[in-house]
Structure formats: structure tokens, C-alpha cells
Image: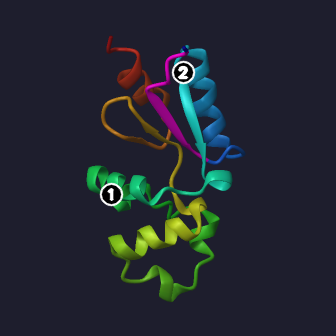
Amino acid sequence: MPRRPSLTLYGIKTCDTMKKARDWLDAAGKAYAFHDFKTEGAPRGRLDAWADEVGWEVFLNRAGTTFRALPEADKQHLDRRRAVSLMLAQPSMIKRPVLEGAGPLLVGFKPEVYAEALLKRR
């Protein structure tokens, strides 16, 4: 029976940064499960766990077009509850990729951070 990957990569399949992360993981020979927010949605339990671990501010993508297109009133006075609700409604607002299983949660893609988390441990 095949072993289930210990890594889960969350994001949107068509995102350029996601492609870089997937290419890096493939080249490093790291097996991972992929969760596509566009087809599978954003799991509330994961968002809550991520908020506990790194803070909602880390994985709310304020630079993306989806967030920038929000009415100003929706962008003001954000707190955890409101931010998670926005990300559940529009998963494009989640900074990506999110990688679980490599130790601390990794948000965004930087090759050197992935290498430190995934290649230097045995």
C-alpha cells in the first residue's frame, strides 16, 4: 500500500508561484498531496489552525487583485474572524502556497526556506 505523503501543499493550480513551489518539490523528490482552493475550497479548520500557528495576517494576501478589489469598508478594521470569513468566501485571498508537514507552517515560496525546512533534516 503506498505511503500517504506527509506534506500537503495548498494553493491554486494556475498560480505562477504555486508552479514554482511544485517544480521545486518535484525536483527535490518530495512527495506531497495538493489541495486546490479553486476546486476543493478553503477548509475552515485549516484556516483556523494556520491563524493559531502563524497569525491570520501572514496568510491573508493583501497584495492580490481579489483583496484590492474589495470595497474599502471590507478592508477596514480586519480581525481574525473577518479575515477568515473573507478567505473562506474567496480563497484567492489566501497567500500561497501554504505548505504543511515540513515543521513550521510555510507560507509563500522561497527556495532557500524550502531547502532549509525540507533538505537539511533527515
With 40 as the anchor, is 50 left or right in this view?
left
**Which amino acid is tagged 1?**
Ala
Chain part drawn in magenta:
2-11
Question: Which of the 4 image quarters holds residue 24?
Answer: top right
**Which amino acid is tagged 2?**
Ala
Residue that sits furthest to the top in the current view: 122
Where is mark 2, residue-wise?
Answer: 31
With 54 as the anchor, is 43 left or right in this view?
right
Q: Is residue 96 above or below residue 74?
A: above
Q: Secondary structure at mark 1?
A: helix
Q: Secondary structure at mark 2?
A: loop
* Along the line of sight, the residue nearer the viewer: 56 or 69: 56
With 13 as the anchor, is 68 left or right in this view?
left
Where residue 88 sits in the image (x, y, percent)? Answer: 52, 66
Residue at position x 68%, y 52% in the image: 39
Where residue 92 sits in the image (x, y, percent)? Answer: 60, 60
* Along the line of sight, the residue nearer the viewer: 80 or 70: 80
Graded by Cα atoms within 10 Å as few (under 14), some (14 to 19) or many (20 or more), the crowding at tag 1 reads: some
Q: Is residue 53 above or below residue 87?
A: above
Q: Which image quarter holds the C terminus?
A: top left
Residue at position x 40%, y 21% in the image: 118
Graded by Cα atoms within 10 Å as few (under 14), some (14 to 19) or many (20 or more), the crowding at tag 2 reads: some
The mark total stands at 2
Residue that sits furthest to the right in the current view: 14
Q: Are marks 1 and 2 in contact (CB under 8 Å)?
A: no
Where is mark 1, residue-wise?
Answer: 51
Q: Is residue 101 above or below residue 79?
A: above
